[in-house]
Image: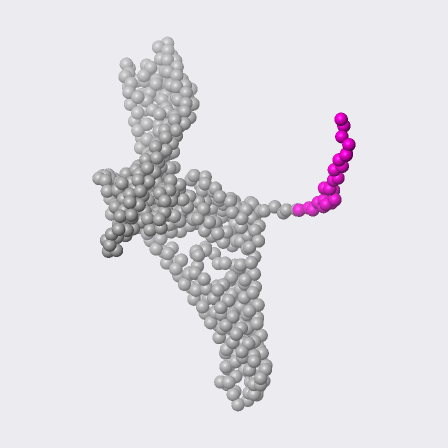
């Protein structure tokens, strides 16, 4: 086998080669066919069903959204029809509908049970007072002054209880949790047991015997209302006050870019801690930008694409018998392979220089386009001031509203802003309509150019952007421990959505021991004695 056939047998990616022997050609063709078969087996592409991204990237969804060119002529070529539906799409849509229906049913079922229990609680004391008048009114004793005063007490206590329950329980839900809130369920069971116990005692001791002492019946109803007020106080302690004392410090890390925040939480269950973290996430974390991540991935892929891997020490399974010519050819191939591996290693070692210069060039472009943008925006706002001065001299009917003023000056800054957003990979976060609305808002409130540019020069929190760009339909809580169990030292769980996940680690706040050291106030006093005579 000659040099070229040996090189093609030992390399993973071989180029074109010429052979001088038929056996070498057969060996090359055989290995080439095997490599094609292996590539055809390993290069299987599975098209996953498209998921809705957090930032509304049109390249991911394939849906017609706001054009990044803002009026310029562009042509997008895609390989898949946007109206086509695969079996995976149908399964995903069906699953989403089932999940949404299940969540809605559970939410309405919980609300229905809460309303039924609340009606039972409020109607029970009134029923205790009304039933004797309906069933045996002729046997009841007269109600004196003390009994009539108890009526006022029951009325005001029920009113206070109604307002307290409305303030604590009938609040709009912040989220749908995967499991039942344990303390709230225990309180509901406790209230149900209390009401059932009072009804049993009322049926046995009052209804069966038809008690004639109506003042005692009224006091019995008052005791039920008092017990309900105490249970409501217990609910405030368990649901609101217990979690106020900070016990844990949680570290929240975004899996894609490593953005990290720390929060202090009280004694919460894992699912309620996850809810508190998500509420902080939308206000504290900068918006997730997958375009920045794709740039780093493309840089790494470009670097790896230039590397070739060679098998220097292996043996060709179909090599012919060794001979002087074959040994020389094999040695030459080995030396060439080692030389190419050394060249690839040197290129890999110099890749940090390429990365350094790429980042320096990117920063230079960003600073240049930022300067152009700042100048364009300042000129536009200066033009607005001149327009306002001129409009003050006009009639009231000819004054331009802020929306029209924003549309008039937007073209002067649109190109600079578009180039800056493209350079910083933010073009999918801001549409032309949202920028014009923000510009009109700044004009209405007499804001400066710097205030207008702050939304585009610095990545803001997730809630700053449009709802269509960041809203994730559902978060998934992944935890080894039960989500209803409380936080502990070293608890780790994940909050996963479509594009990324939040890794949460909890640490217990250490016990702090303070000691006091007393310093005598007299120890700081001193006396300065000056001699009246001085040396001559």
Residue 434 is a magenta residue: no
Give the image location of residue 108, x and y in percent.
41, 63
Name the image colouring.
one colour
- At 57% across and 50% down in the image, what residue appears? 247
Q: Residue furthest front?
A: 536
Give the image location of residue 491, x and y in percent.
54, 46
| Apparent side of residue 99 relative to residue 521 in the rendered image (left or right) | left
Vertical placement of residue 426 versus 397, above or below: above
- Residue nearer the viewer, 441 or 326: 441
- Residue nearer the viewer, 410 or 165: 410
Where is residue 342, by image quadrant? top left
- Residue nearer the viewer, 519 or 490: 519
Please identify the dominant SS of the magenta region.
loop
- At 77% across and 32% down in the image, what residue appears? 533
Image quarter (top left, top right, bottom left or bottom right) of the C terminus: top right
Q: Residue furthest top?
A: 324
- At 54% across and 76% down in the image, what residue appears? 154
Give the image location of residue 1, x and y in percent.
33, 15
What segment carries the magenta color?
514-536
Residue 516 is a magenta residue: yes
Vertical placement of residue 280 versus 335, above or below: below
- Residue nearer the viewer, 254 or 14: 254
């Amino acid at each position: 086998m000659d040099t070229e056939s040996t090189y093609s047998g030992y390399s993973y990616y071989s180029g074109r080669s010429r052979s001088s022997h038929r056996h070498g050609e057969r060996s090359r063709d055989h290995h080439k066919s095997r490599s094609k078969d292996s590539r055809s087996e390993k290069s299987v592409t599975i098209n996953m069903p498209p998921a809705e991204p957090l930032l509304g990237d049109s390249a991911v969804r394939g849906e017609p959204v706001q054009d990044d060119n803002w009026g310029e002529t562009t042509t997008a070529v895609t390989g898949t029809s946007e109206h086509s539906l695969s079996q995976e799409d149908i399964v995903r849509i069906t699953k989403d509908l089932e999940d949404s229906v299940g969540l809605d049913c559970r939410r309405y079922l919980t609300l229905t049970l809460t309303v039924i229990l609340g009606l039972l609680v409020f109607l029970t004391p009134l029923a205790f007072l009304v039933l004797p008048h309906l069933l045996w009114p002729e046997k009841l004793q007269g109600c004196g002054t003390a009994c009539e005063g108890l009526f006022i007490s029951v009325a005001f206590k029920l009113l206070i209880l109604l307002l307290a329950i409305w303030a604590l329980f009938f609040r709009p839900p912040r989220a749908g949790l995967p499991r039942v809130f344990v303390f709230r369920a225990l309180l509901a069971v406790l209230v149900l047991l209390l009401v059932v116990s009072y009804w049993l005692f009322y049926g046995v001791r009052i209804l069966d015997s038809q008690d004639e002492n109506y003042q005692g019946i009224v006091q019995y109803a008052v005791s039920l209302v008092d017990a309900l007020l105490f249970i409501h106080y217990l609910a405030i302690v368990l649901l609101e006050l217990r979690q106020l004392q900070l016990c844990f410090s949680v570290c929240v890390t975004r899996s894609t870019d490593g953005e990290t925040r720390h929060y202090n939480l009280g004694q919460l269950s894992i699912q309620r801690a996850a809810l508190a973290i998500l509420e902080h996430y939308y206000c504290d974390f900068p918006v997730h930008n997958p375009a920045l991540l794709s740039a780093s991935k493309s840089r790494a892929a470009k670097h790896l694409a230039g590397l070739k891997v060679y098998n220097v020490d292996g043996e060709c399974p179909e090599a012919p018998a060794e001979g002087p010519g074959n040994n020389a050819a094999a040695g030459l191939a080995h030396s060439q392979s080692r030389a190419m591996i050394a060249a690839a290693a040197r290129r890999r070692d110099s890749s940090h220089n390429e990365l350094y210069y790429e980042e320096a060039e990117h920063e230079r472009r960003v600073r240049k386009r930022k300067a152009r943008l700042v100048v364009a925006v300042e000129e536009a706002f200066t033009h607005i001031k001149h327009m306002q001065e001129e409009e003050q001299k006009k009639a009231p009917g000819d004054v331009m509203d802020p929306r029209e003023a924003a549309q008039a000056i937007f073209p002067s800054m649109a190109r600079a802003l578009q180039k800056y957003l493209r350079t910083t990979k933010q073009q999918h976060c801001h549409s032309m309509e949202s920028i014009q609305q923000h510009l009109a808002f700044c004009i209405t409130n007499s804001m400066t150019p710097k205030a207008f540019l702050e939304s585009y020069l610095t990545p803001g929190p997730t809630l700053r952007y449009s709802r269509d760009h960041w809203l994730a339909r559902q978060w998934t809580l992944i935890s080894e421990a039960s989500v209803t169990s409380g936080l502990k030292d070293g608890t780790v769980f994940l909050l996963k959505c479509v594009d990324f996940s939040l890794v949460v680690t909890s640490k217990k706040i250490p016990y702090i021991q303070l000691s006091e050291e007393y310093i005598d106030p007299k120890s700081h006093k001193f006396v300065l004695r000056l001699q009246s005579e001085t040396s001559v």
